[in-house]
């Protein structure tokens, strides 16, 4: 059956959402609920001399005004603490929190908190930050050791510590293969250029929010739209000195996450709730979300990419820097994996640095490091194709890595669909059709390794015959519906007879975070195993009732029947009742499935962008767009298509105008949707999706992850299209329209 012909399933929660019945965290009202408003630093770097809270405390309804010094749990000075203690590291860092009985009172009082900060030197761009005389952003003991790359599915390339690490460099990568100097000298043509991509905000519809209630037993209940409830539970328990079972995290519906809602406000709100002894809610305003939220990092790449006249790549030299703000950063290793492993490169030299600056710390944003790395690599590949007068898809086909080729970290690529997606792109009508005046087509390739985390799932059969599956991974992209399809196939019923519930941490089986394109891949096998075990338990009861061997039984239309003798059957509901009746002799149907997938199933994708350019005005319009992606086996095709649409638009936004821009003092100048240019509907044409199915030998039913890849190549694809149409190479995004007007080659 073709992908297009395969029936899809409506999302389990879709009806509630479209009817406005879904309760988000902001809809939660608790008796005695208090509200919090933050006081944010107005300077990029400084020592806190004092915080005057007297005027704020005088506002009616104010319960408390809390500073970092009031929280004994905060024993150090670090930019990622819930509240600053003695230093501020960036404009927007929380310095104090006002707790009041209404949001209005909290907001009014926050305006009256006077913060006395002795400003110190700061640095705002990585190039300046690594200079010998640059201000020091982070002391060694202020750099967190946590490596978040694994949460988001990147296989981090091996890192080698340089003997002379520059100032403010918090992470390094230094990978080599072969003699790159000789490889570049032996090339017939070398692209040598610099590429840069700006910081990006997640732009989710729902700003960060968290509610925490102290419980009579000394524990805490946390309600938050988190992608990682077990991460939140464990971190809060460690911070406040509670046992994990004393912290119950209730994952609420997520109004957009994209990697930015694993954990953020929850530890601070937990501390404030314990201090107040009452339930506390903190909801960021949109402007606070922009200045305080953790964005995707900006990056700069200096590349030299060489090839022979026939298009065979000879070598790559790359030096790159990430601006990770006032935090440790972790994108460099992922970047090296992409740069060194995507194509067959006999030699490469990859040197990367994560650099600290006095801007907000960065976090994961859908396909972290992927969009940045492939913007540079795929733009250079397009330049190479033009210089050699080669078809850009054919150039990629000639060089792309295949099964058995070496990855950047010395491993071997498993079965991948790199060739299949490129061939589909080469034959796509959008790529092959003739071009009109001012038109051009750009292409770009991308890949994603995919995360995997040991996970468990529960399954039971309800009295009405419904198969109930319980997991601990929040549904942020329709994953519950996909898991229901997996459970249905394993159990032998229709998907509409399966219900997947995401439980809180007190009841849920341990499951992966909802990040890194891993829920279906990591949790799906556990769901499949749990459903198969529940089926076995059900049939075990039926064998005695029907006096038939288990291998002779089938589940058909809500009944267990003997093969070849359909009249010999028994309702599933009857079997369930037999397992739950008073003084019954059958054990309840309660199953558990566990999985620890050991092997990755990397995903490849190609995007095609067609533009029309006006040389007089510098205006360009995206007139056609296609995304071709290997999805393994498409479990729920309409949902996958929606994922690809969303990811493609996010990638396009990085080229069209999305960027966080700071002034010379470290103040954010794009702190609202008036200034931060999220693509509008009239800028995006219909996106044609082609799903290539190369089933995974490890994923459930052959599925692979699908969430990250579509957010990767679109930035480069659009930039390449505009470059070809305007006759000027775009090496920096967002695209500067004034540059197009000034430099357009007619």
Image (spheres, grey):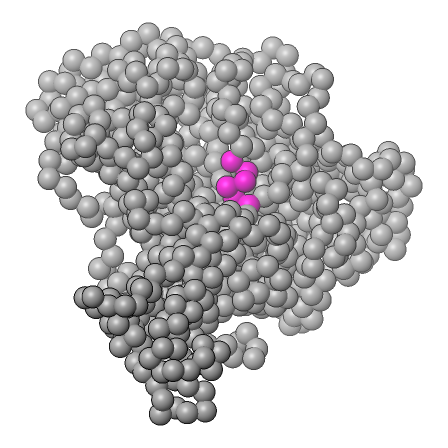
Left or right, 455 with reference to 386: left
Give the quarter of the image for residue 550. bottom left
Tell me residue 171's x, y (percent). Answer: 60, 26
Residue 746 vs 328, above or below: the answer is below
Tell me residue 91's x, y (percent). Answer: 40, 23
State the residue at coordinates (43%, 64%).
533
Reply yes or no: does residue 150 show up in magenta.
yes
Q: In the image shown, does 364 or 48 lie closer to the viewer?
A: 364
Reply yes or no: does residue 329 show up in magenta.
no
Q: In the image shown, does 263 or 537 lie closer to the viewer?
A: 537
State the residue at coordinates (54%, 23%).
356
Give the quarter of the image for residue 178. top right
Left or right, 186 with reference to 692: right
Left or right, 453 with reference to 434: left
Quarter of the figure with the N terminus:
bottom right
Direction left: furthest residue: 60
Tell me residue 455's x, y (percent). Answer: 46, 50
State the residue at coordinates (68%, 34%).
158
Q: In the image shown, does 585 or 520 lie closer to the viewer?
A: 585
Give the quarter of the image for residue 130. top right
Tell me residue 644's x, y (percent). Answer: 51, 60
Q: Which residues are magenta?
A: 148-153
State the residue at coordinates (39%, 91%).
566
Left or right, 354 with reference to 23: right
Q: In the image shown, does 713 or 84 lie closer to the viewer?
A: 84
């Amino acid at each position: 059956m073709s992908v297009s012909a395969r029936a899809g399933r409506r999302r389990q929660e879709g009806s509630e959402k479209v009817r406005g019945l879904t309760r988000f965290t902001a809809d939660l009202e608790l008796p005695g609920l208090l509200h919090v408003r933050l006081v944010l630093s107005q300077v990029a770097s400084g020592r806190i001399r004092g915080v005057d809270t007297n005027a704020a405390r005088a506002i009616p309804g104010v319960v408390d005004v809390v500073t970092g010094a009031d929280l004994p749990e905060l024993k150090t000075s670090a930019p990622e603490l819930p509240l600053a203690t003695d230093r501020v590291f960036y404009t927007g860092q929380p310095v104090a929190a006002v707790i009041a009985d209404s949001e209005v009172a909290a907001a009014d009082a926050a305006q009256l908190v006077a913060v006395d900060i002795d400003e110190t030197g700061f640095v705002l761009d990585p190039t300046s930050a690594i200079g010998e005389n640059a201000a020091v952003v982070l002391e060694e003991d202020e750099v967190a050791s946590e490596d978040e790359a694994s949460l988001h599915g990147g296989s981090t390339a091996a890192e080698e510590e340089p003997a002379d690490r520059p100032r403010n460099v918090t992470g390094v990568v230094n990978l080599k293969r072969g003699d790159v100097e000789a490889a570049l000298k032996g090339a017939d043509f070398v692209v040598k250029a610099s590429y840069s991509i700006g910081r990006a905000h997640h732009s989710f519809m729902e700003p960060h929010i968290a509610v925490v209630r102290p419980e009579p037993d000394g524990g805490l209940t946390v309600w938050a739209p988190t992608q990682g409830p077990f991460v939140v539970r464990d971190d809060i328990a460690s911070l406040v000195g509670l046992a994990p079972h004393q912290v119950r995290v209730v994952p609420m519906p997520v109004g957009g996450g994209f990697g930015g809602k694993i954990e953020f406000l929850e530890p601070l709100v937990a501390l404030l709730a314990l201090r107040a002894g009452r339930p506390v809610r903190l909801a960021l305003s949109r402007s606070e979300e922009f200045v305080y939220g953790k964005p995707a990092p900006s990056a700069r790449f200096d590349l030299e990419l060489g090839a022979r006249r026939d298009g065979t790549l000879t070598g790559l030299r790359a030096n790159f820097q990430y601006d990770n703000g006032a935090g440790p950063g972790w994108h460099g290793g992922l970047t090296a994996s992409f740069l060194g492993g995507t194509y067959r490169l006999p030699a490469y030299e990859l040197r990367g640095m994560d650099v600290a600056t006095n801007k907000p710390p960065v976090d994961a944003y859908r396909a972290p490091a992927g969009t940045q790395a492939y913007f540079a690599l795929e733009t250079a590949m397009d330049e190479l194709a033009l210089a050699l007068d080669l078809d850009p898809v054919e150039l990629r086909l000639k060089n792309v890595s295949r099964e058995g080729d070496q990855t950047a970290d010395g491993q071997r690529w498993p079965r991948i669909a790199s060739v299949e997606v490129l061939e589909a792109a080469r034959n796509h009508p959008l790529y092959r059709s003739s071009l009109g005046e001012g038109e051009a087509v750009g292409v770009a390739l991308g890949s994603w390794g995919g995360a995997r985390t040991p996970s468990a799932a529960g399954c039971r059969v309800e009295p009405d015959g419904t198969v109930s599956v319980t997991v601990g991974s929040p549904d942020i992209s329709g994953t519950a519906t996909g898991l229901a399809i997996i459970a249905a196939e394993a159990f032998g019923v229709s998907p509409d007879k399966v219900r997947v519930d995401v439980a809180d941490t007190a009841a849920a089986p341990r499951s992966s975070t909802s990040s890194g394109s891993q829920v279906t891949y990591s949790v799906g096998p556990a769901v499949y195993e749990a459903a198969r075990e529940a089926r076995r338990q059900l049939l075990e009861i039926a064998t005695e009732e029907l006096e038939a061997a288990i291998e002779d039984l089938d589940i058909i239309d809500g009944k267990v029947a003997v093969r070849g003798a359909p009249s010999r059957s028994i309702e599933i509901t009857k079997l369930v009742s037999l397992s739950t009746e008073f003084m019954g002799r059958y054990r309840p149907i309660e199953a558990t499935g566990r999985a620890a997938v050991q092997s990755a199933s990397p995903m490849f994708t190609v995007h095609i962008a067609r533009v029309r350019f006006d040389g007089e005005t510098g205006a360009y319009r995206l007139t056609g767009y296609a995304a071709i992606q290997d999805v393994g086996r498409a479990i729920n095709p309409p949902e996958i298509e929606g994922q690809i649409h969303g990811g493609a638009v996010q990638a396009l936004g990085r080229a069209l105008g999305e960027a966080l821009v700071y002034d010379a003092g470290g103040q954010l100048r794009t702190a609202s949707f008036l200034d931060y240019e999220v693509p509008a509907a009239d800028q995006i044409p219909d996106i044609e999706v082609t799903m290539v199915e190369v089933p995974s030998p490890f994923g459930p039913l052959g599925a692979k992850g699908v969430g990250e890849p579509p957010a990767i190549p679109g930035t480069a694809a659009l930039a390449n299209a505009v470059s070809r149409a305007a006759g000027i190479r775009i090496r920096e995004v967002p695209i500067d329209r004034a540059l197009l007007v000034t430099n357009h080659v007619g």
